[in-house]
Image (spheres, rainbow, N blue to C red):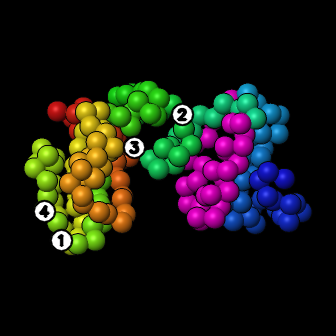
Amino acid sequence: KLVSLEKQANDYARSLSGGMKRRLLIAKAMVHRPPILVLDEPTAGVDVELRANLWNYIRDLNKKGTTICLTTHYLDEAEELCDYISIIDKGKILKDDTKNNLLNIISNKTVSFAVQEKISIPKELDKYNPILKENNLIINYDKQKTTLKSIINILNNNKIDFKEINTYESNLEDIFIKIINENDQ
């Protein structure tokens, strides 16, 4: 039932779509409830809906106690599903750590404030090289040295109103590229 193949119960495996074949393979692997499940590229070539369903299924299996070992080239998938990640290049493990520790390798963060009117940038923000572009104040900072709250306090102290805040930080793909580039040097 977890793989949603009830309607195809009487179909031949060769008649199933690629995504349904993947579900069938996962179901076959899980029939004996193994403590560890190795999934190699489980969502390669599947549609968006099936991918989301497989992610939910994998999460559910993990919550029920199954250890999932996932290999994937989709770094957003690894970032979404994995607690511990190994970055491998040309058969060599370059880095393995918790997802949170890996995501903190690059500590740069960007915040954008949608300001309602033309403003003068306070001098206290100069150290962040602020940019004012189309009513957006954009600030880059090191999240290990500065907090977003301290930047907001500077804006509040200078009576700068904003209607929206958007933050952006490095994702696993940025980390992967950094680690691979460091290894190539």
Q: Earlier in the sequence, mark 1 or mark 3?
A: 1
List the residue tagged with mark 2: 83
Q: Which residues are magenta?
A: 36-63
List the residue tagged with mark 1: 118
- Answer few, some or many: residues within 10 Å of disc 3's Cα (few below 14, many 20 plus, some between 14 and 19): many
Q: Earlier in the sequence, mark 3 or mark 4?
A: 4
Pinpoint residue 168: horizontal percent, then vertical percent. Answer: 34, 52
List the residue tagged with mark 4: 120
- Answer few, some or many: residues within 10 Å of disc 2's Cα (few below 14, many 20 plus, some between 14 and 19): few
List the residue tagged with mark 3: 172
Answer whether labels 1 and 3 touch (C-beta < 8 Å).
no
Three-letter amino acid code of the residue under disc 2:
Asp
72 lies left or right of 140: right
- Give the spatial CA distance, label 3 vs label 4: 35 Å
Answer whether labels 3 and 2 touch (C-beta < 8 Å).
no
71 lies left or right of 135: right
Three-letter amino acid code of the residue under disc 4:
Ser
Pinpoint residue 97: horizontal percent, then vertical percent. Answer: 44, 27
Q: Earlier in the sequence, mark 2 or mark 4?
A: 2
